[in-house]
Image: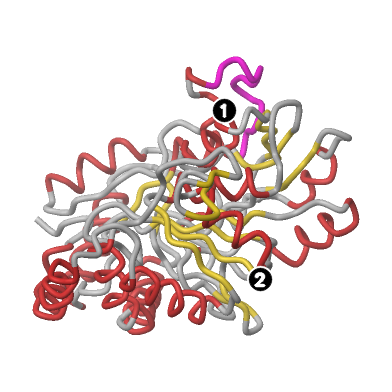
């Protein structure tokens, strides 16, 4: 079976370096925040092209704190997309604000700028585009609309570490950028982790306080705060892995090009090819109207796959009170019903890629899939 994700292969390549860093972190006695986390923050800020980086415990916490740092709260609205992991919308609701959703573009699969401006109201406090699957949203268009209306932009870059365009990387386009370091991400911790980047020193100071109970000094609490700190071992692990991220990104992009070569023009729709390095391929998703059947057949052929995400957020029961229903966002709904994520990780070898692609083409040819346009 070709796995959908193989973290053991990653560990086999860099395990000794991780083990050395872990032992150093343990011997330091700095188990929460500390010098290892501070070193990672400095290096990650440099990597992203931002002035400040703030390490936290999860990507969800990163989004939550980012919105609070912009004074988002009850009575406010925050615009985002429905085609995302549920944490994006959950973070908005944690602040007491109302999530307002727009549909995705049918080609890029990210926030449709054409719908964004129509969703802005006097209550809109922020915009949260999502760099889905590792592809940058149309930040030029989104930022132009945000600037016109005087709104901050919080990038959900939790799947897009290192995605870049015109010399700028994900997280450095908006007012604040948020990242997840969940183990399966392009830059993943050996446990939970998250990060925030910004160029604004005032926001960075407030974020550092809020992640640690709102403290300006020990036992002096200036803001309502949270226990959202990163632990020292995860900071050490991430600092090691960060040095490998450019190489891993190049390999992911190579895998995507090979899939495009082998699957392009076939019976399933493939994602829009990357340009200007804006896509770092956290996920490589094909589309088929016989998606569920195709997934089962691929499993039988020794190919593990995944679905991101089978039900868009606006149709989740927990968010029924927002008033959306079937048909509210047709592009997102079709996407959720048709996309299938193929194995994608840097260690995939050519023979494995060919096996996956050949299985997809052979199996899909047996069924009149009539795949929708990517």
Residue appearing at x 60%, y 15% in the figure: 321
Instruction: Name above or below for residue 240 compared with residue 363.
Output: below
- The image's colour scheme reads secondary structure
C-alpha separation, residue under disc 2 versus residue under disc 1:
32 Å
The numbered mark, 2 or 1, whose residue comes first in the sequence reads 2
Could you tell me which quadrant the C terminus lies in? Answer: bottom right
Which residue has dot 2 on it? 199
Which residue has dot 1 on it? 314
What is the x, y in percent for residue 134? 47, 63
What is the x, y in percent for residue 146? 81, 55
Could you tell me which quadrant the N terminus lies in? Answer: bottom left
Q: Which residues are magenta?
A: 319-331
The image quadrant of residue 240 is: bottom left
The image quadrant of residue 207 is: bottom right
Residue appearing at x 45%, y 35% in the figure: 337
Q: Is residue 323 magenta?
A: yes
Instruction: Name above or below for residue 100 compared with residue 167.
Output: above
Would you call the spot at circle 2 few (<14 residues within 10 Å), some (14-19), or many (20 or more)? some
Instruction: Name above or below for residue 347 compared with residue 295.
Output: below
> What SS does tag 2 mark?
loop
| Residue 266 located left or right of residue 240 | right
Q: Is residue 196 magenta?
A: no
| Residue 3 located left or right of residue 214 | left
> What SS does tag 1 mark?
helix
Residue appearing at x 75%, y 67% in the figure: 140
Would you call the spot at circle 1 few (<14 residues within 10 Å), some (14-19), or many (20 or more)? many
Depth-wise, is mark 2 or mark 1 nearer the camera? 2
């Amino acid at each position: 079976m070709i796995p959908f994700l193989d973290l053991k292969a990653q560990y086999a390549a860099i395990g000794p370096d991780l083990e050395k860093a872990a032992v150093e972190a343990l011997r330091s006695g700095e188990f929460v925040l500390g010098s290892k986390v501070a070193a990672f923050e400095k290096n990650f800020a440099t990597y992203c092209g931002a002035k400040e980086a703030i390490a936290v415990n999860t990507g969800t916490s990163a989004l939550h704190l980012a919105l609070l740092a912009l004074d988002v709260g009850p009575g406010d609205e925050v615009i985002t997309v429905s085609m995302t992991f549920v944490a994006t919308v959950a973070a908005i609701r944690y602040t007491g604000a109302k999530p307002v959703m727009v549909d995705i573009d049918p080609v890029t699969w990210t926030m449709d700028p054409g719908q964004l401006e129509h969703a802005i109201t006097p209550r809109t406090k922020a915009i949260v585009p999502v760099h889905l699957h590792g592809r940058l949203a149309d930040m030029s268009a989104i930022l132009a609309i945000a600037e016109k209306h005087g709104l901050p932009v919080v990038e959900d870059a939790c799947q897009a570490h290192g995605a870049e365009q015109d010399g700028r990387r994900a997280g450095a386009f908006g007012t604040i950028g948020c990242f997840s370091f969940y183990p399966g991400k392009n830059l993943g911790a050996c446990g939970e982790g998250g990060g925030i980047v910004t160029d604004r020193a005032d926001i960075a100071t407030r974020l550092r306080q809020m992640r640690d109970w709102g403290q300006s000094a020990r036992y002096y609490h200036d803001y309502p705060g949270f226990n959202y700190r990163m632990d020292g071992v995860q900071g050490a692990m991430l600092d090691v892995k960060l040095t490998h991220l450019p190489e891993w990104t190049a390999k992911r992009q190579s895998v995507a090009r090979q899939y495009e070569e082998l699957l392009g023009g076939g019976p399933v729709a493939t994602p829009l090819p990357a340009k200007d390095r804006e896509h770092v391929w956290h996920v490589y998703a094909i589309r088929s109207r016989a998606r569920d059947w195709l997934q089962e057949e691929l499993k039988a052929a020794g190919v593990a796959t995944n679905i991101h995400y089978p039900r868009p957020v606006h149709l989740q029961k927990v968010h029924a009170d927002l008033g959306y229903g079937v048909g509210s966002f047709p592009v997102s709904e079709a996407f959720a019903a048709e996309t299938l994520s193929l194995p994608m990780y840097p260690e995939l070898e050519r023979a494995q890629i060919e096996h996956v692609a050949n299985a997809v083409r052979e199996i899909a040819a047996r069924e009149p899939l009539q795949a929708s346009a990517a």
